[in-house]
Amino acid sequence: MSSWPILSLVTFLPLVGAAWILAVCREDETGANNARHAALWTSLVTFLVSLVLWVNFDPRNPGFQFVERAEWVPAFGISYHMGVDGISMFFVLLSTFLTPLCVLASWTAIEKRVREYMVSFLVLETLMVGMFCALDFVVFYLFFEGVLIPMFLIIGVWGGKDRVYAAFKFFLYTLAGSVLMLLAIIAIYWHVGSTDIVQAMNYGKLPFEWQFWLWLAFFASFAVKVPMWPVHTWLPDAHVQAPTAGSVILAGVLLKMGAYGFLRFSLPIMPLASEYFAPLVFGLSCVAVIYTSLVALVQEDMKKLIAYSSVAHMGFVTIGIFVVNAQGVQGAIFQMLSHGVVSAALFLCVGVVYDRLHTREIADYGGLADNMPKYALVFMVFTMASVGLPGLSGFVGEFLVLVGAFKANTWVATLAATGMILGAAYALWLYRKVVFGIITRDAVRAMPDMSMREIAVFAPLVLVTVWMGIYPASFLDVMDASVAKLVADYQAALKAAGATALLGR
Amino acid sequence: MEFLVKVIVFLPLIACLIAGFAGRAIGDRGAQWVTTLGLLVSAVLSWIVFFKVGFEGAGGTFRVATWIVSDTFESAWSLRVDTLTAVMLIVVTTVSAMVHLYSIGYMAEDPGIPRFMSYLSLFTFAMLMLVTADNLVQLFFGWEGVGLASYLLIGYWYERPSANAAAIKAFIVNRVGDFGFALGIFAVYMLTGSVQLDAIFKAGPELAAMNFEFLGVQVPALTTICILLFIGACGKSAQIGLHTWLPDAMEGPTPVSALIHAATMVTAGIFMVARLSPLFELSQTALAVVTVVGASTAFFAATIGLTQWDIKRVVAYSTCSQLGYMFFACGVGAYGAAIFHLMTHAFFKALLFLGSGSVIHAMHHEQDMRHMGGLKDKIPQTHWLMWIGTLSLAGIGIPLILGHGIGFAGFHSKDIILEAAYGAHSGVGFYAFWLGIAGAFMTAFYSCRLMFLTFFGRPHDHHHYEQAHESPPVMLIPLYVLALGAVVAGFAGYNIFVGDGWEGFWRGSIAMEGSREALHHAHEVPWLVKVLPLVMGVAGIAVAWWFYVGSRANLPQMMANAFPALYQLSYRKWYFDELYDFLFVRPALWIGGQFWKKGDVGIIDGVGPNGLAAGAARMSRILGRVQSGYLYHYAFAMLIGVALLVTWYMLSRGQ
């Protein structure tokens, strides 16, 4: 098994499907249908193959597993280097888990250019998975930036009314940060003499002045992706304009790229700067939690409200990462996974009613509990998961982050914990306005309950949400060793720096 | 034992799932019987466990599965059964079983029976998880779980805007309390490295000597933890300040009010303080806070109960007030007395609620007492059963005979609380005692006012009066069972809960040292103290009779006219809702709007992307007329940025 290039397989399998669709499917109704099926089956198989990762993963090994390595540009020390550890493994699974659901959710909603749409999603999947597996800066950068392109197209081509504005806003924001990150990568290469991420992680000789600037450069890129306040304003627009499945991937996976970057690069390679800038991150995150929760409270568009809630939830993630203790980091990773599932599901919930009534205005709905009881139940589950009800996935991450944060700084934990109250306010308000109340419009009364296809989309999501809430050990155990190593290395680096500082004096 | 306990806890969950998911398949009848039978079995088993634990010394902690483990942070799914839990088990399952049974009749014409029964069972499961928790996180799970069930059941009639508003209010106000609870858990873990109860208790003395920095201030560890946790208790048990959700929660169907908002969920706060009494006991400051908050609520809620017209709201404020009594009992160290009152209160208050439900049922869902009257001949059984509940609530009995007196359940439990408060011989103890005595008068008054307005006098609404009919047996049987409890629970339980047998009964499940002292002093108070509550109770009844039955003049109206400010203060519930709306709700929405329109759209987008976009031809076409001003903003911001960078660079070089 170890000789099998399983990561490459998971990464490039969707690309094969995409190529097949382009080669075989024609641009008519049958072609569109074939494209749908091809995309679904490709992504399903990819998901099944990716499960092998989980099954064969050794949770006691804190290092990288399933490693593949091939020389690429030896002159510059660039190699095709892939591997996953307890931190990245679940993000691969999250990507492969959500993609088939996205395809299924777009089954009838997308009517024009179905072929290209499905290809975009499969390419997107390849890029996402590749990004989480990459262990070489150049490979990482290619995947990381590459993700922008299909996403840009998905929003720009299949999006809503103001899709072009939103797509450009998304592109400009994220590109601005990326340029700085590229500079930082070059700088790291100068120091380390290789673009290998593992080597950079173990380098340990980066002086503080360098860490300082590099950290800021990476931060510029990652903060936009998370997104952190105040560079979050692209997100509501992008979500509102994106087609449902676009929002699902955007919220489910793309938002995790920034936080993943913090975990993979900022903490291990720039520990001193991370410690130095932690207060900045805490400050921005607390503002994010409170500010965006309040903004979410007054939204009139369902997607915007959920988009703002995403910013608030990701605020917990950045707090958890930068408190750098076991609970904080594990909580942050868990919160990302949970948010990946829950916010994806919430956007799908919006999609269900949008497909029927073609409006996202909260005020246009009301009373859905009457004619859509199944929908009401599903929506309730995810609302509660988003609110952080114990027993569902949202609680575990949020609680662990706060436990970790409280140890580091009681102010941060207390301010962030107000998100518990505000989060309940906007989520329940949304639910009340959409699902409860009396039906006043005939168009709403005529809406049918969820179809079998929709149930097939939601059932796995509900299952995972409950599972993560009741038995989170399945997930926490896997990340345990890698997180422990991350935290220990970080503390050791701080200690060593403290020692040299003392000696220097 | 382990098997028994697991069945008790998980049977309601299974019943909930069956009724919820197979509701259509098994039909309304099926859903009713699955859930009700499930609860009846749970209740019978609970009594077995109660006797085994309380009298034979059985018990223990049974692990079910791992839950959240992260490094040293460990919380497992486990079931802890000791005397305190066993008492809660019988209270929860007995009342719940009765409410399930009652609901078959009460909700007979409702279109959503399986959903309703499923929610009731879900609630019961969450409550059982709460009372069997062995660590703070599972306690929190149960805590929020009952909150969810409460939210779902208050908003059960989802077409009603008032029900939806009340449901959200309940959830959010509780979340405010939970915010404190959660911070308390974080602090406990940070300082003791555990969230498991026994480990925390063991670390208690150490904590008492410790300080830690909280929000920039050095604070005593134990006191801070206890107060943070107590904030959670205040939310769930509707204590002054966080009580506003409870009266509104009466929007839910009446069986829900009886089960959740009277007998069980709202007592979770008292259970928590008793459960953590080994910690609270070590902080006199925290106990003083508990006493003052409890006593204040006992008084404050009673004053509101005097003037309300909605039959359920009167009982709701009464619940709020009675919870205050339980809290100050804890505050003066009489944890056993608090749990004793919790139990008797569960019986007589559930009885009163279900009785009110029976009245409402008879009146075709009329809840305003001004439209009732003269019902005693129309629904005689309900009438007499409600008198039992009322006299128990008013604390009627004969003190000083047969050892500790004889009377209705509430008489025994309320008197020992007042005696303990007096016996504490502390400032806060006397504060609690005198407010409690005043509360006793008001309690008797408002509960009899309810009875007289409803059952006596002339009918005010002839149409409803003519239609009124006695409830079916399926609703009356639960009333009889609860009435039995409201009569005998006090006399039967006195000895083991707070009398000579208390030490052998509680066996360390509540703080023993504090209890010993509190009970010792409580039994030695002057006889006047033992008689005073009864005097106040009888006086309250007499005044209520004179006001609403005896006098020909309209005395209540005359009183209201004579003291308009006081009347309005009571009738308007001390203006808490208006105040909170002004202080929190409106500002939050206003700030949210400002952040959005001015912050995100105005400043951030204005300076950032839209300003940038001004250069991009395509963007500017879309943005149209708004673009022109932004380029200037952007250039300005960039200049500032450059200036800052240069300054910083020069400064850092200069060093």
Image (spheres, coloured by chain):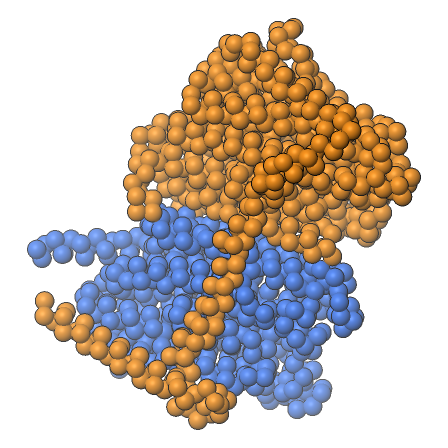
Chain colours: A blue, B orange
Residue B211 appears anywhere in the view: yes
Q: Nearer the viewer, residue A232 or B118?
A: A232
> Seen from this angle, which residue lies furthest left?
A505
Q: Nearer the viewer, residue A78 or B320?
A: B320
Residue A175: percent from left, percent from top: 39, 81
Residue B509 appears anywhere in the view: no
Q: Residue at x 23, y 67 (%)?
A: A211
Q: Residue at x 71, y 46 (%)?
A: B252
Indicate the quadrant containing the C terminus of chain A: top left, top right, bottom left or bottom right: bottom left
Residue A155: percent from left, percent from top: 54, 81
Residue A183: percent from left, percent from top: 28, 79
- A164 sits left or right of A444 in the view: left
Q: Residue at x 51, y 32 (%)?
A: B296
Q: Is residue A290 above or below residue B91?
A: below
- A358 sits left or right of B280 in the view: right
Q: How many marks?
A: 0
Q: Nearer the viewer, residue B69 or B603?
A: B603
- B146 sits left or right of B449 in the view: left
Q: Is residue B522 above or below residue B619?
A: above
Q: Residue at x 35, y 51 (%)?
A: A411
